[in-house]
């Protein structure tokens, strides 16, 4: 007998399907998004895999079904993106015959990463003409895509980032799924939550595996050793990966930027973003610059290059003296080595001739 | 042809009016080394865990990847699932190797509704999809699968492939699969002996050493092992012996060279 049937569920309560549970959006204020769509604003949904982008789309479809025509298109589906056809296909037969065009449609575009500029322009055109009420773009990363500037202006601050789970939301998610059954003590929830790296999909996946193991052992309360045996490799992995923290930091910084952007409701958003970006990574950039300067001097032996590169920041000027000294030493060494290299083959050649 | 008793067959074959198959001379009704994945499910050794896992994933509605070398029983495990869940028109088995690259997986899923279903674009619901040899599946079709899975048209998908990392899956599908990948374990030569013994009902046809030798020469693939056993037994019967000897493995040794 399957474990969830033992607990009295008909279906898998931890299913990761976006369509499985309708009111499941624990961490999100869906009303906020619906309002934006009602106001005919464009929206960009961004977030890591498994944080609920498709589930938000599913909710949008459910909410607006019957009120507006909804078109869903995924750029990974392989069909060619032909907006005219899509819009035409959404019209009912009567409208197609009479030639009256449907207005105020909602276009949902999934996996926008492979969208070309031309396609984006055509979307914009339809939006401006009022045939499309809103367009919802979905992609794991906003900054990877080259959207046209006009489109960016329309998007404005409506870049919504699907957020990581926090512990309270994770607990809420579990009670939403399994009700008041005392299967997961809060300590265990925290343990699994830590392993799932705040990703809702991973979290549900791990919960399912752990619950299954525990119930199959006929324990109706999950305990620590259940988690440890089932997620053994995950725990081992997480311990190993603790060394590589800098990546995580970058991600967190990015998210903060987006949140800041939401707060600042100003007109020239894209410019702001760039400005913030530059401030964000000063340490890394100076590091790489220093490195480059050294390289330049080593290779070209041009003092001019050094001066140009050092114009930007005063900090490096101090170090300039140090680096110059080093460089001289390095140069001498290099020339020496070159001379040696040249001598050796000549010598060998003579030997062969004899 | 009428079913003949074995003794009767033997009598007839003496007069030359009926040619006996090699396995019939050894008192088997069928080829004991058949490699048809649709049969011999009980003989799947070491696989009970994987089959249980597969049944559970199908029931609970998620995806599972079964990874294993060729000839180790991937298709056979899928067939076990097809047998168990089939019958209500909800299971689709697709061998991606034979699937045309331009083929749309949607049509495969809609096939069960026939022409009328396709005209009205009727979509299936809660299907169980068994996909064999996924590394032949195109990226477009994987994306379609993802969509159907998300929309609950497909309840669960079981993939099989030799190497999951090499399959052309998109990242979003990979994330949905997560760590739900099971590996069919490689067999030891003792397992091989057990399999062959199971097939020939502990008769004296092969001795253990010989089986191990054949297994080694078949590159640890169960499918090849059974095929080679069949050939060896055939050649032994042709020489009117009741036991397979090393001489019957000549063809194998030649191949190796």
Image (tube, helix red, strand yellow):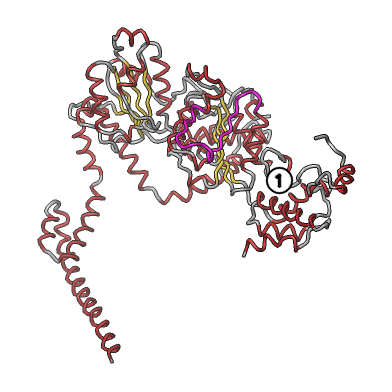
Q: Nearer the viewer, residue A146 or B26?
A: B26
Q: Is residue A322 visible?
A: no
Q: Residue at x 77, y 42 (%)?
A: B30
Rendered position, B246 above or below B131: below
Q: Quadrant of the N terminus of chain B?
A: top right
Asked if residue A20 lies left or right of residue A46, the reply is: right
Camera-nearest residue between A313 and B70: B70
Q: In the figure, residue A297 lies in which quadrant?
A: bottom left
Examine the structure image and report whether residue B100 is included in the region drawn in magenta. Answer: yes
Seen at 78% across and 57% down, the residue is: B236
In this orientation, which residue lies closer to the viewer: A82 or B63? A82
Query: x%, y% of residue B62?
Result: 55, 32
Please give the chain letter of the residue carrying mark 1. B
Q: Is residue B151 left or right of residue A108?
A: right
Above or below, A107 against A203 in this view is above
Quarter-wise, where is residue A353 in the image?
bottom left
User: Which stretch appears magenta?
Assistant: B86-107
Mark 1, other Cα within 10 Å: few <14 / some 14–19 / many ≥20: some
Nearer-the-camera pick, A250 or A21: A21
> Helix, strand or loop at disc 1?
loop
- Inspect the magenta stretch and tell me whether residue A170 lies in it: no
- Image quadrant in which the C terminus of chain B is located: bottom right
Q: Would residue A32 be found to the left or right of residue A299 on screen?
A: right
Residue that carries the numbered disc 1 in the rendered image = B45
């Amino acid at each position: 007998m399957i474990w969830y049937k033992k607990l009295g569920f008909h279906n898998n309560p931890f299913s990761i399907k976006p369509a499985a549970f309708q009111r499941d959006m624990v961490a999100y204020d869906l009303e906020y998004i619906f309002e934006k769509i009602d106001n005919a604003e464009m929206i960009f949904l961004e977030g890591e895999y498994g944080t609920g982008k498709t589930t938000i789309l599913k909710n949008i479809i459910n909410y607006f079904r019957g009120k507006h025509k909804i078109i869903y298109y995924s750029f990974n589906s392989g069909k060619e993106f032909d907006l005219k056809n899509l819009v035409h296909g959404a019209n009912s037969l009567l409208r197609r015959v009479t030639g009256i065009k449907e207005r105020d449609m909602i276009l949902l575009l999934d996996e926008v990463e492979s969208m070309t500029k031309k396609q984006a322009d055509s979307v914009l055109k339809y939006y401006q003409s009022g045939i499309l009420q809103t367009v919802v773009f979905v992609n794991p990363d906003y900054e990877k895509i080259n959207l046209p500037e006009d489109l960016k202006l329309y998007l404005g601050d409506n870049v919504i980032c699907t957020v990581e789970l926090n512990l309270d939301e994770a607990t809420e998610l579990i009670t939403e799924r399994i009700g008041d059954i005392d299967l997961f003590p809060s300590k265990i929830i925290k343990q699994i939550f830590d392993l799932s790296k705040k990703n809702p999909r991973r979290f549900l996946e791990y919960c399912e595996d752990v619950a299954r193991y525990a119930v199959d052992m006929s324990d109706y309360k999950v305990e620590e050793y259940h988690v440890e045996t089932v997620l053994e490799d995950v725990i081992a992995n997480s311990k190993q990966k603790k060394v590589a923290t800098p990546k995580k930091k970058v991600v967190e910084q990015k998210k903060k930027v987006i949140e800041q952007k939401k707060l600042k409701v100003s007109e020239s958003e894209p410019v702001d973003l760039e400005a913030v970006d530059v401030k964000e990574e000063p340490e890394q950039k100076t590091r790489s610059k220093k490195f480059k300067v050294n390289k330049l001097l080593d290779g070209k032996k041009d003092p001019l290059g050094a001066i140009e590169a050092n114009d930007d920041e005063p900090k490096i000027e101090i170090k300039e003296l140090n680096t110059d000294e080093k460089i001289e030493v390095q140069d001498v060494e290099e020339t020496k080595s070159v001379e040696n290299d040249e001598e050796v083959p000549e010598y060998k050649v003579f030997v062969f001739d004899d | 042809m009428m079913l003949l008793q074995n003794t009767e067959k033997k009598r007839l074959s003496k007069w030359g009016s009926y040619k006996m198959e090699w396995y019939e001379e050894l008192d088997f009704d069928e080829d004991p080394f058949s490699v048809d994945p649709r049969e011999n499910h009980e003989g799947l050794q070491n696989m009970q865990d994987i089959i249980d896992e597969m049944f559970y994933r199908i029931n609970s509605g998620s995806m599972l990847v079964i990874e294993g070398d060729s000839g180790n029983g991937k298709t056979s495990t899928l067939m076990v699932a097809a047998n168990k869940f089939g019958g209500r028109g909800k299971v689709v088995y697709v061998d991606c190797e034979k699937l045309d690259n331009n083929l749309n997986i949607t049509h495969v899923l809609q096939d069960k509704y026939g022409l009328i279903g396709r005209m009205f674009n009727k979509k299936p619901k809660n299907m169980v999809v068994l996909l064999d040899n996924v590394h032949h599946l195109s990226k477009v079709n994987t994306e379609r699968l993802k969509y159907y899975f998300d929309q609950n048209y497909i309840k669960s998908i079981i993939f099989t492939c030799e190497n999951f990392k090499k399959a052309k899956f998109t990242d979003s599908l990979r994330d949905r699969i997560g760590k739900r990948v099971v590996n069919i374990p490689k067999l030891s030569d003792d397992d091989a002996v057990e399999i062959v013994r199971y097939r020939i009902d502990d008769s004296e046809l092969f001795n253990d050493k010989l089986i191990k030798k054949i297994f080694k020469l078949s590159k640890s693939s169960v499918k090849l092992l059974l095929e080679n056993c069949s050939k060896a037994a055939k050649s032994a019967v042709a020489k009117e012996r009741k036991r397979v000897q090393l001489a019957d493995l000549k063809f194998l040794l030649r191949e190796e060279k």
